[in-house]
Image (tube, rainbow, N blue to C red):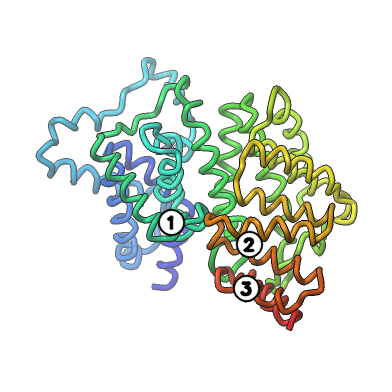
Amino acid sequence: MTSVRQAVADAHRREWATVLAATVRVARDLDLAEECVQDAYAAALDAWTRDGLPARPGAWLTTAARHSALDALRRATTLRSKLHLLVEPEAADPEVPEVPVVPDDRLRLVFLCCHPALATEAQVALTLRLVCGVPTPDIADAFLVPQSTMAARLTRAKKKVAAARIPFRMPAAAALPDRLDAALTTIHLLFTTGHTAPAGPALARTDLAEHALDLARMLHRLMPDEREVRGLLALLLANHARRATRTAADGRLLLLAEQDRATWDQQAIAEAHDLVPGALRGGSPGRFALQAAIAALHATAPAYADTDWPQILQVYDELVRAWPSPVVALNRAVAVAMVSGPATALAEVEALERDERLAGYRYLPAVKADLLRRLGRPAEAALAYERALTLTGNDAERAFLTGRLAETT
């Protein structure tokens, strides 16, 4: 039973988006499709225990979910009105199949859920939950809101989809730019959730980060001239290149200064470096292009001591203007500490403490604690480390903060 449960869990991580995309095509109803996919995974526990693991778990789950959706539609009194939705149009020439606007089912489903009838935040949250399988608590963490608030937003978004009868059809190529920003934000938050997991025993969830990187690559192939698409791909490549060095062999978190740069993925860093100039050219750069530039400056420095902090701070100044986010302001304060000293940065961090949007953000007290430690104020640093510990559910981060707290006391 343990091996079956593990197989179902692996299939959930790897196949959820593909199975859901195939089921939406049949159901044409997001709630129904999600319910049928969940039923398929539940049925897999019994069937795979009884009959053994299938050779292709994703195909098994897709078939089960689609059959469940068809059965639900047949039972519905509105079958006749929905029958035409079950018929997929044939290609004009059977020898030359029609090429879809978006060639990958996972990326297609991202654009389907990023429907302009919904607010951008609702588009992103709904896509993360339904398409990417990110748990509601982790989505709430990404948006810096309580879990109950995010759960309510997701429920309202799904009700709006149902009440307005929003059609989940693939938009024409000309309509893709209207959905692009939400798609980019979704992929970025998916990567962020995988790069440093909000909770759990491991620092990262590599499966989510690699899923996001795959989506970014597909999006770049689809829209290679979009500057922000280039920027997002470069940002993800530069950060993911460090994945093998972010923790020690015993799972201990390693700071950027402690990581072995010789083992970073140099091919990914070079690819990111080549993408950045094209993302920055052609007018005022966007938020993903600017973040990519910062990540590239970190990644291409020969050693931590060689990091060009004044240049990084200059790019952060542009990023704050382009994207006035309190999280960006906090990250900028870290660069300020390296250029102007921890005292100057501490004043900026204390000002950010008055921003209610950062009330539950674990990195705010963590940054403050580090600045106070560097200023030789251990008692105040200890209080800040304790506050950070109450907000952190990631075991690797907790171990790091606990060690720093012990040093200050």
Quadrant the C terminus occupies: bottom right
- The residues bearing labels 2 and 3 have C-alpha atoms spaced at a distance of 12 Å
Q: Earlier in the sequence, mark 2 or mark 1?
A: 1
Q: How many marks?
A: 3
> What is the CA distance from the residue labelled 1 to the residue labelled 3?
27 Å
x%, y% of residue 18?
A: 42, 44
The disc labelled 2 sits on which kind of residue?
A: Tyr
Between circles 2 and 3, the one closer to the viewer is 2
> At which x and y percent is residue 177?
51, 26
Please say if 74 is above or below 302: above
SS type, badge 1: helix
Residue at image point 32% right, 63% down:
51
Is label 2 or label 1 in front?
2
- Report whether 179 appears left or right of 264: left
**Residue 398 shows which numbered tag?**
3
Residue receiving disc 2: 363
Give the alpha-carbon distance from disc 2 to disc 1, as whole Å.
Answer: 30 Å
The residue at the point 43 percent across, 56 percent down is 12
The quarter of the picture where the N terminus appears is bottom left
Which of the two residues, 284 or 35, is positioned nearer the viewer here? 284
For label 2, the crowd category at 10 Å Cα-Cα, with few meaning under 14, some 14 to 19 and many 20 or more, is: some
**Percent coordinates x, y for residue 390 in the rendering:** 56, 73
Query: Residue 95, relative to residue 339: is it above or below?
Result: above
The answer to whether marks 1 and 3 mark residues whose Cβ atoms lie closer than 8 Å is no
**SS at badge 2:** helix
Give the amino acid type for the residue marked by disc 1 in the picture.
His
Q: Which SS class for mark 3?
A: helix
- The residue depicted at 68 percent of the width and 27 percent of the height is 284
- Is 82 situated left or right of 9 in this image? left
Q: Nearer the N terminus, badge 2 or badge 3?
A: 2
Residue ID for mark 1: 12
Q: Amino acid at mark 3?
A: Arg
